[in-house]
Image (cartoon, helix red, strand yellow):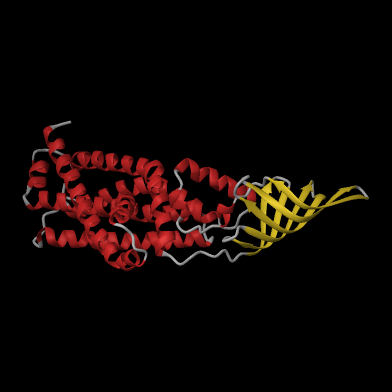
Amino acid sequence: MRILDRYILKKFLSAFFFVVLIFVLIVTIIDFTEKNDFYIKHQLSKAEILAYYIDFVPFIVNLLTPITVFIATVFVSSRLAMHTEIIAMLGSGMSFRRIMVPYLIGATIIAGMNFYLNGWVIPKSNKDRVAFEVKYLRNPFHYDGRNIHIKIAPDLYLYMESYNNRSNVGYKFGLDKIVDGELKEKMTALSLRWNEETQKWKILNWTLRKFDGQKEIVTQGEKMDTTLAILPKDFESDFSLQETFTLNELYQYIEELEHRGSDNIRTYEVEKYIRFMSPFTVLVLVFIGLTVSSKKTRGGTGFQIALGFVIAFIFIIFFIMSKSVAESGNMLPWIAVWIPNIIFTGVGLFLYRFVPR
């Protein structure tokens, strides 16, 4: 790596971390101001609030990384252009592609960090952050699902008319065993209750019917302890649940939802694709940022930085729209999630035609 590469890379990474620091401070102060009433209401200690923001900051850093890296690129390259440093590089025979190398090295470092942290580190802190928000910042959660159908095994189908997540009791419980399209066993019960001590379900006032051709065997009982492939946590709040899974856990949970035939699987598929998309977003935005700010203008760096904010804002709109489309089921999740990158890659290639040579 040449001295010039180290010079640009140092400026780029320094600017990135500085922009991240500024944005995190601003967002944290605003967030604290908005939530302070809740902290007072629940009489939270300074230690509890501090612990929350220790988990909150990595989440914000990850959320803002694509935009902050874009702003850092625009700031550094526009400053180099204003001081005619880019013109000097080009005049010495260096191509614009060669000038891009330290930027892309820096972008690759940030993208790699983003992928690793977002895949395995930040979800662990998100577990505590989301739990804190559910407990103190949101209204008490009441599970209001009716006529619940869950596939809990390849041939087992569970039914409940309703479930009370406060007492962990399901009402009008049913469990069907269907093999090759034929009903083999059918259990019905007045209720299903979770036993915290045994970590098992207690089925109350149950009736079991077994079918063997034309023959039917009926057995009944008052209580039965059993283990099922569902837990009380499956009926708790799913607020930002996808953000609390590491990448490995996310894959396992999606597989579990597919096994159950769940309807809300798209939210988790979108999260999975976003985690792979975000590092590439960093590379795309660095490329665009460099192309829009590498030319010296009369307006100075202020105009180029303002242009950078506009492009960043447009990207955010595209991202939010594509995410909504993906979660609504109107488009395949991976296609919808990648649309902003595809469009802005095209924008970057178009702008590249006008960069100084």
| Residue 80 visible in the current orientation | yes
Q: Does residue 94 sit above or below 144 in this rendering?
A: above
Instruction: Say which residue appears at 52% left-offset and 62% top-offset.
Output: 328
Left or right: 214, with 312 as reference point: right
Camera-nearest residue between 242 and 280: 242
Q: Considering depth in this image, is 196 or 110 the residue closer to the camera?
A: 196
34 lies above or below 204? below
Instruction: Give the total of numbered labels.
Output: 0
- Residue lying furthest right in this view? 214
Q: Is residue 332 left or right of residue 135?
A: right
Q: Image quarter for residue 205?
A: bottom right
Residue 355's spot in the image, x, y percent? 19, 51
- Which residue shows up at 10% across the image and 41% down it? 89
Q: Quadrant of residue 115?
A: top left
Direction from residue 210 to residue 351 in the image, left or right: left
Q: Residue at x 38, y 59 (%)?
A: 319
- In this rendered view, identify the residue nearer to me: 316 or 128: 128
Residue 116 drawn at (x, y percent): 36, 40
The quarter of the picture where residue 192 lies is bottom right
Residue in the picture at 17% in, 45% down = 14
- Is residue 354 shown to the viewer in this render? no
Q: Position of residue 253 (x, y in %)?
A: 54, 46
